[in-house]
Every structure is written in structure tokens, then in C-alpha cells.
Image (cartoon, rainbow, N blue to C red):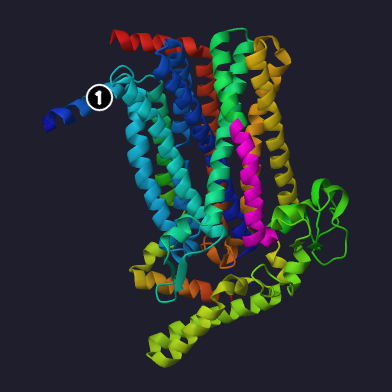
Amino acid sequence: MVENISGSLIDWSRAQFALTAAYHWLFVPLTLGLAVVMGLMETVYYKTGDEKWKRTARFWMKLFGINFAVGVATGLILEFQFGTNWSNYSWFVGDIFGAPLAIEGIVAFFMEVTFIAVMFFGWNKVSRGFHLASTWLTGLGATISAWWILVANSWMQDPVGMVFNPDTMRNEMVDFWAVATSDTAVVKFLHTVLSGWVLGAVFVVGVSCWFLWKRRDKAFAVRSIKVAASVGLVAALLLAWTGDSSAYNVAKTQPMKLAAIEGLYEGGNGIGLVGVGVLNPSKERWDDGEDAFLMKMEIPRMLSLLATRDMDGYVPGIGDIIRGGYQLPDGTTALSAQEKIERGRSAIASLADYRRLRAEGDTAAASAARAELMEDMPYFGYGYLSAPGETVPPVGINFYSFRVMVILGGYFIAFFAVVLFLAFKRDISRFRWLHVVALVTIPLGYIATQTGWIVAEVGRQPWTIQDLLPVGAAVSGLEVGSVRTTFFIFAILFTVLLIAEIGIMLREIRRGPEQAASDVSNDKKA
Amino acid sequence: MRNNVLVRIYRFYLDGFRSMTLGRTLWVLILVKLFVMFVILKLFFFPDFLGRAGDDASKADYVANELVERME
């Protein structure tokens, strides 16, 4: 339904938020990853007192600073857009969303702002130990910030620990720990932060290989590669493990997302995992009878194993979820999408009745309407949908994005293993093909992190909050022209800033670690 | 003693900002970005729907109407 809100407004609002989020996510993972790499380098300096490690850490710290400065506040714009473009959502989520973001703001401000200043201004002004602690605390602050942001995002994917209050029209938190430590939040945090570590490692290895390609600063480059590739390999292996946990969790909490990721229209027991496949572009609806694939290569029964931990476990497809009638893991029978839509409409009607009756002072009738509302509340968002087919997220973008992410994840494991072998057992500076591969791998790192978020967010459609609020009900009633205009302003601004960042970053990389050494010398003179 | 610590912290930051080279460019970037995003866009494009609604009860009424009417 959502008849008085145009699809164009929803699309432009989503596009604007996606643009901002994608841009923000260019900076965050590199911040998280570089923090670990430079922290380890400075730790070696602290332990050995070897100035080479100080020079190395300081070089990467400078690139961290550029990335941090250009990326800072892009996350604030997202929070700003919640209020302007998604005002219904913003009010409806209440303190569930506000509390984690407020904690994030306070922690980010006190930890990052305080310790980042010591990290950059404090060389030779504070003790080595205090400086090292500040470096690690800067990274820890960024990681804790990520935790709370991801808690908020996870709640949108898997809303728990709250009760809807029809008087305030807000969801009110009743169990903080259920929100903060839900399986979805824990898995998402680990998977996301580890992806940042992988990107940081890919970046450091790639830039270091550029120095080797240019035949300069060889010792510095090899030192950096050894640290970064070690971090990268460990993180990439752990990423595979958390990815598996993530898929298992999605199967439980967002089965439609999993079905879309797999292009699985008809489920069953012992379902295979599509390793490689080409979707049939002629398939436009879930029930049009067209084959889902032009070709596919499956790993037999693997999807059942990943989703249920049982090779013969039942995995519902898109059609099964829409038709309902299958047994859920808790033993109950799944409702059909049409039944959910009807209960959602009933919930919205009960909400209208409750507020009208309360205003009229009819307490008893209002109480009955409220009871009906609470009974149907789990399906509230379905009331805004016109047809069962609207519950299906875009299959193509989910299917392909997921495979790009997973294939690149596997590639990173092999990449770091080869780099580590050559760095520790051979003279890596002689393998010029590897230098090129490492440079090409930098954009692949970004593609992997972006496709990961595409799967997470596009796979959640049509919901802003799973089952409770679709995008059409969440969006503000803005003029489409305003949203479209600001979309292009943001796009231009972000592009200019990105060009500026890349320009500054490349200039500093070209200047190399010698400049960092020169800075250190100047500090000593000072 | 306390003043002394505060003065040292103040000087630490002051010296740090004064000695910045690349940092100055980055600060200019940050300020331009914040100005464009939060002042220009806020002033010229987006009405504050909830802000116009007044107190919390009015905001709840506004959102309730929105959510009910969007189904109809």
C-alpha cells in the first residue's frame, strides 16, 4: 500500500542513504584495520626501542590520520538523515536506536578525540608507554564505536529487547543486554570489524608493494608487509568463520534474505549451495514459473548444513516463505505472507482505534484495542504491503554481491598466505608480479567490504526494521525534487572529498617513510 | 597544581595544532565538509517534520497519523 508516498521518493531516499553509507564505509574499515597494524608496529618499537619501527609506525599513522580526517563526520550525516529523510522511523525506533548511538557518540568523542591527539602530537612529549597506550586506545575507541553502531543496525535486522508503546508511538527498550548482545549484533560486529582488519592489511601490503615495485624503501616495505600480512591472514581466516556464523544467524532471523542470497525459490531438505551460477533474467516474479538459473554449480546439501547445521535440514525458499505452512525451528507453523499482511493491517487498525478511543476517554474499549494491537504487533509492518510478492528483496543484487564477497574472502586467504611465505622465506622484493597483484588487491578489498554491506542492507528490503516497518512507512513525506537534488549534491561533494583524500594520500605515500623520519628528527630538535 | 596540569594540557594541544602542516589542510577539508552538509543542506532542503510537531505528545500524534494514513 503506502499509496500516498511515491515509489520515486522511496527510491531516491534509499539511494541517498545508500550513497552516504557506502561512502562512509570507504573510511571506517581502513581506520579499523590500520589501527591494528600501526598499533602492532609501535608495540614492536616500544619493546625493542628500534627507531626503524617508530619510522614505520609513524608513516602508517599519517595515512591513518588522512583517512580518519576525511572520513570523520560522514557517519554523522547518516544520523542526520534518519531525522530528515526517515522521520517516522526515527521516532518509531525510540531509544532503542538512540541509546547505542548516544553511547557511541560519547565514547567516540572522549576516546578517539583525546587519544588521537596524544597519538599525533605526543611523540617525544609523552612517555613511550603512554604514547603506545594512546595509539591502541584510539583504535579501541574506533572499534567500540563500531560496536554500538552495529548494535543499532543489528536491531533493525533482528528487533529484540523492546516493547512498542502505542501512547508514545515508540519502541521502548526493556532488555538492554538483549539488544546489545543479540546473536545478530555479536556476529555482525565480529564479521564487520574483521573485514576492516583485512582491508587495512590489504592496503598496507599493497602500498608496501608499490615501494618494492619502485625499488625504494625496501626494508621498510618488507617490515610493513610482514606485520600486515600476518594480521590479514588471521583476520581473513576468522572472517570465514564469522561469515559462516552470520549465514546461520540469517537463516534463523531473516530466512527471506537467505533465500534471496541463494536465488532459492523452492526450498526443501538437503539443499545445495550454489557456488557459481547465472540467474535467469526472464524470471521477474517468484511465482511466474520461470527457472531461477540459466546455469549453476552446486555443492550438494551444503546450504542445509550451513543454515541448519544438518545436511538434511529444511531450508525454505522464497515461495515456501510466501506460502507458509512449513514447520519453524521452534515447532510452530509458518504463517503465509498473506496472513501476515492481514494481521499487520489488523494491527494498524487497532492502533488507530486505540488512539481514537483513548482520546474519547473510552478506557475499556481502548484497552481492548490495545490488546489486539499487541497480539498482532509482530506483523505490524506487513500491513503496509499490498501483495505477498513485496516481501521479496531484489534477488539478483543479493545473489551476485554475496558471491563476490565470498570469492574475494577466499582470495584474501590465499593472497596473504602467498605474501607471508614470500616475505619470510624468499626475497619478496624480487617478485614483481606480486607487487602488481598486491596493488590490484587494494580495490578488491573495498569491493569486498561494500558488497558485504549491500547483502546486509539490500537483503533486508523491504524493511527498515525487520517485519515492523517497511521503507515506505518509514520515509519522511519530503518533496522528491529535494531528495533528488541533495542526492546529487552529496554525490558531487563525496566525489570531490574522495579525490582530495586520494590526492593527499598519494602525495604522502610518494614522500615515503623518509619524511616521517624527518618529522621525528624535527621533534627531537624541538 | 591542578592549574598546572590544565595549563600543560592546553599547551600540549596548542603546540600540537601550531606545529601541524598536513593537519591544517585536513582541518580545512573537515570544516568545509561540515558546513556544506549541516548548514546549507539543513537550511535549504529539509523541513524538520518532527521539530514542527512541538512537544513529544504532538510528535507521537504526528507519527501515529502518518503510520495509520499510509496504510489507507
Quarter that holds the N terminus of chain A:
bottom right
Above or below, comparing residue A212 to residue A264 in the picture: above
The chief SS type of the magenta part is helix
Q: Can residue A485 be seen in this view?
A: no
Q: Is residue A85 left or right of residue A258?
A: left
Give coordinates of residue A113: x percent, y percent.
35, 35
Magenta-drawn segment: A234-257
* Residue found 55% across the figure and 18% down from its top: A224
Above or below, comparing residue A117 to residue A125 in the picture: below
Quarter of the image for residue A466 reads: bottom right
- Say what secondary structure mark 1 lies in: helix
Q: Nearer the viewer, residue A452 or A70?
A: A452
Q: Nearer the viewer, residue A477 or A469?
A: A469
Above or below, comparing residue B69 to residue A311 in the picture: below
Give coordinates of residue A170: x percent, y percent.
43, 69
State the residue lying farthest toward the left: B1
**Which chain is disc 1 placed on?**
B
Q: Is residue A171 left or right of residue A184?
A: left
Q: In this view, does A94 lie to the left or right of A451?
A: left
Q: Which amino acid does label 1 sit on?
A: Phe
Give coordinates of residue A444: x percent, y percent.
67, 32
* Residue found 69% across the figure and 66% down from its top: A390
Q: Which of B7 and A35 is in front in this view?
A: A35
Give coordinates of residue A277: x percent, y percent.
83, 46
Quarter of the image for residue A311 reads: bottom right
Category of crowding for the residue at label 1, using alpha-carbon neighbours closer than 10 angstroms: few (below 14), some (14–19), many (at least 20) = some
Above or below, comparing residue A503 to residue A139 in the picture: above
Q: Can residue A5 be seen in this view?
A: yes
For disc 1, the marked residue is B12
* Residue found 68% across the figure and 37% down from its top: A409
Q: Which of A89 and A232 is in front in this view?
A: A232
Quarter that holds the C terminus of chain A:
top left
